[in-house]
Image (cartoon, grey):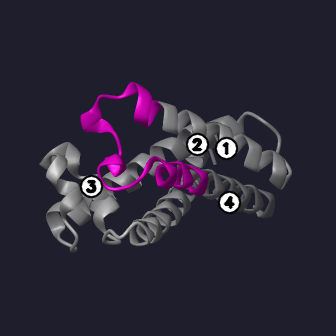
Amino acid sequence: MNRPLQTGLSAAISGTVVSVATTAVLGLLARTEGKGALQPTNSTSHWLYGEKAGSVRHADVAHTLVGYGTHHASSIFWAFLFETWLASRPPRPPLVMLRDALGAAAIAAAVDYGLVPKRLTPGWETVLSKRSIAATFLAMAAGLAAGGMINDELRRRS
């Protein structure tokens, strides 16, 4: 299989792991902060619906589907960059994979909350504390590392 296609497929796997893991963590953290479990996902639709998106507590197509779709696409984007980095290096042991994933998640956090316009942030800041947002980026790192290890194993088997 050619390298760009392999990297894209790897990013789809890693990005899905990241998306599912971080969505679960966001929901749990929102509940611990007395918010609705779907509010962080709904808040990600703020690029389309404005700041009020984070106040929506129930599931609906406009906020939840758009928010999750946006988050999933973003997760695949960051996973693509991470998988491109991994493809240019030999397979690594789990702790080195986690170190690299922590670096990638730190870059994602810096870009998402330091460089992009407010309308393009994940929107979690309208619902969650900074501590919970930081914990979510740690979950992102864990998801990237897990996805990277899954992809290493898949490549080894093929």
Q: CA distance from mark 4 to mark 1?
A: 12 Å
Residue drawn at x 55%, y 62% is 17
The crowd level at tag 4 (other Cα within 10 Å; few <14, some 14-19, many 20+) is: many
Residue drawn at x 18%, y 47% is 51
Helix, strand or loop for disc 2: helix
Of residues 62 and 138, the one nearer the viewer is: 138
Specify start and end residues of the magenta stretch as a single range: 111-139
Q: Amino acid at mark 4?
A: Ala
Helix, strand or loop for disc 1: helix
Numbered mark located on residue 43 in the image: 3
| Marks 4 and 1, the one that precedes in the sequence | 1
Q: CA distance from mark 2 to mark 4?
A: 13 Å
Residue drawn at x 29%, y 64% is 39
Q: Which residue is mark 1?
A: 102
The reply to whether dot 2 and dot 1 touch (C-beta < 8 Å) is yes
The percent position of residue 19, horizontal first and vertical second, equals 47, 59
